[in-house]
Image (spheres, rainbow, N blue to C red):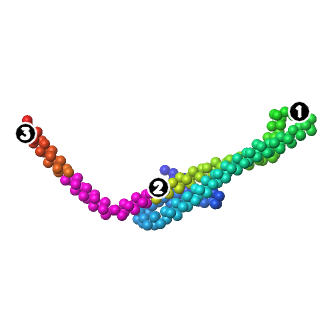
Amino acid sequence: MDLSILQIKVITSLGEFEGDLQGDLVINEGNLTESFVDQPGKYAWYAVLSSSSEATVEELKYSIDAKRDYINKTLYGKLDTKVREDLDEEGEKVTETKVTSRIYQEVEYINETAILNDLRAKYIEAVKTYGLLKAAREAMIHRKDMLVSLGAYKRAGIDNNELFIKSEEITDKEERVKKVLSNKTKKVSKKEK
């Protein structure tokens, strides 16, 4: 199984970070105290990165909407007027097809569209990063649950051993009782025949 996916590198509004999720999820059963102590910090780290990443997604979403609105409304309208004037000055017949075609060829339109496409690519990457960090935060919650379970097991370890021994003794007694009852039932059945 390839665990390289658990080596994470993320860029959020807080900066660029690298982490080892697999290593952060490890619980040292020999020293549970250490794992208990580092759990809140690990969880907080992934929770903060996740929240920051979510904010980055929302910021990019807003930027995409704003850029698209600017291109479709303000820039397109400005270029539409310019192109119509240029076509008129050139003595060409002004048609919607010619106007639209020329708008798409304008340097300003091409540059703004490139910026929009770049924002969309960053948005896709930010959504992936947010998904990864959200999963990492959830994994830290599962780690906490496992720590709680291991701590309870360790605290009750002696009692569990005693319960296991008593359970074995009870099982042995039950087996002997079943044998005795089974033998008596066989003897009663033979007498009735």
State the residue in front, 11 or 174.
Answer: 174
- Reading the image, the residue beneath label 2 is 142
Q: Position of residue 109 (x, y in %)?
A: 79, 45
**Label 3: element kind:** helix
Q: Residue at x 64, y 60 (%)?
A: 14
Q: Secondary structure at mark 2?
A: helix
Q: Is residue 154 magenta?
A: yes
Q: Secondary structure at mark 1?
A: loop
Q: Amino acid at mark 2?
A: His
Q: Is residue 138 above or below residue 191?
A: below
Q: CA distance from mark 2 to mark 1?
A: 69 Å
Q: Is residue 78 left or right of residue 23?
A: right
The type of residue carrying mark 1 is Lys
Q: Which mark is residue 93?
A: 1
Judge the density around disc 2: few (<14), some (14-19), many (≥20) Cα neighbours within 10 Å: few
Instruction: State which tag comes first along the sequence, 3 or 1.
Output: 1
User: As rendered, which of 73 and 177 lies closer to the eye?
Assistant: 73
Drawn side of residue 43 relative to residue 120, left or right: left
Residue 5 or 44: which is nearer the viewer? 44
Q: Residue at x 9, y 39 (%)?
A: 190
Cα gap from disc 2 to disc 3, whole angstroms:
62 Å
Residue denoted by label 3: 191
> Badge 3: few (under 14), some or many (20 or more) residues near its Cα, within 10 Å?
few
Residue range highlighted in magenta: 145-173
